[in-house]
Amino acid sequence: MNASGSTDVLLSKTGKKKRKGISLLESLTLEQIYEHAHSTIQWVGQSKAKAEKNQLLGQWETVNSCQLCKVEKLFFEPPPKFCSPCGARIKKNAPYYSGTITESGPYYFCLPCYNESHSDSVLVDSIQFLKSKLEKKRNNDEFEEAWAQCDRCERWQHQICALFNAKRNAEEKDAEYICHNCCIEEIKDGLRTPLPHNTVPGAKDLPRTVLSDHIEEHLFQRLKEERQNRAYKYRKSFDEVPGAEGLVVRVVSSVDKNLKVKPKFLELFPEENYPIEFPYKSKAILLFQRIDGVEVCLFGIYVQEYGAECAFPNQRRVYLSYLDSVKYFRPEIQTVSGEALRTFVYHEILIGYLRYCKQRGFTSCYIWACPPLKGDDYIMYCHPEIQKTPKSEKLREWYLSMIRKATDEGIVVELTNLYEHFFNSKTDCKAKVTAARLPYFDGDYWPGAAEDIINQIFLPEYDKNLRKGKVKKTITKRALKAAGLTDLSGNASKDAMLMQKLGEAIYPMKEDLIVGVYVGP
């Protein structure tokens, strides 16, 4: 502590006060600095060929090389670009058009959307973009990592290698950056002690919630039990077997939203008071782990919670919107059952969440096991090269394995799928087979499929062709009555036709539309 009583201010060579904490390196111990410096030349997450190439380049260090990773130019995956009109991701190296006329940032147009407009302008968000003003580009931008210069030795490091906070540096003009080598020398000479961890806020400093505390408590208890089981199996003490350390779970977003029902679907139920929108709470839950003294976001989920105030059929339902992870979890070991400890942790976070939902009165959880398409990502916009995108079958089994664990713990009482639960249900034979019973979630498979089906079979051309015999009638009056539809009016029969077509679309993929039912506290 200096004379001013502050631990984050020091005097420069000129006697002027300089603010500390511009880099996370300053809060690391000597051992952690060594660990971090070593990790920067391991190229964790990259393919074997690229890692070996970078390590070879590091052997030919020059004055232009980073003092940590030993290479000169460091490039990162550029942030994804999405077409403003259609929302599709613009692929790598694909041509696109760009225009900026508002403070909200640039607008992007993929080639199909640009060519679809036969006029001299393109419309998006009620804004007309003149084609002559749009700039044609190719999505091949390269993002080179910026540099930071040590205020002591004046040597250079990549900002990311140096754990350098460029935003804080820009905001605080009196800040001083000290590189890892100078930090090491000063610690050894007794001139420096690591800054308190609260100098640079981390994951633990993010606000806690009842939900994050619940998941953490559940996760840590299960990790303790798993570690005890491993110690018993290998006849070692608890401390002799490795465990997952430095984990933090936080709810980083909790936002009230309203899902508007698509108008064509709504037209099928004019007399049933079907809701025009469904209110829900959107939550983002993240897992962090301290690795080599630095907190890394490893895993995240987005969920939609439709509470008691929401109307049927969404009332008290939960939908798992997105799940994503990056393969950096440590330690890379297996549990007693043979599964990766990483998988165990991610499963227990979900199980802890399901337990929380059950205690809060939710009745079921819905999951669409759908891996991202090639080139797409869900929450993290890029992933380590060594991380493979799971196939549909493997992802489905991953979710089912988690649900089976929750069933064994008494959290889930029934494991089924959307098709068996609503299209082929034997539990309630008197229930009317209608699309109005299907939970309607934001981004789920069937609402989008239903809109496509409605566009195909309920257009005037379809009815005209049906009368002329050009298309086959998909459902008979006898079938309508068998489905519990005594009202054979236009909308009722359209509802039944929609359910039949939806059933045909869902059946081949029914195992991917998972439903976990839990009733009672």
Image: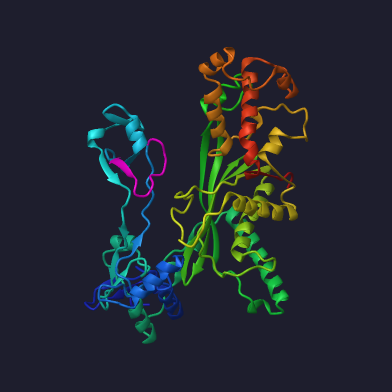
Furthest-bottom residue in view? Answer: 189
Q: Is residue 451 left or right of residue 307?
A: left
**One can see residue 384 in this view:** yes
State the residue in front, 299 or 393.
393
State the residue in front, 168 or 224.
224
Q: Is residue 377 left or right of residue 476?
A: left
Measured from the top left, where is residue 219 in percent x and y? 63, 61
Q: Which quadrant of the figure has residue 342?
A: bottom right
Q: Is residue 359 above or below residue 501?
A: below
Measured from the top left, where is residue 407 in percent x and y? 73, 52
Q: Is residue 174 left or right of residue 27?
A: left
Measured from the top left, where is residue 507 in percent x and y? 65, 37
Measured from the top left, where is residue 515 in percent x and y? 67, 43
Q: Is residue 200 left or right of residue 290?
A: left
Q: Is residue 89 magenta?
A: yes
State the residue in front, 4 or 497.
497
Q: Is residue 120 above or below residue 156?
A: above
Residue drawn 37% across the image and 81% down it: 184
Q: Main secondary structure of the magenta part?
A: loop
Residue drawn 42% across the image and 68% down it: 49
**One can see residue 311 in this view:** no
Quadrant including the N terminus: bottom left
Q: Which quadrant of the figure has residue 127?
A: top left
Magenta-colored span: 85-98
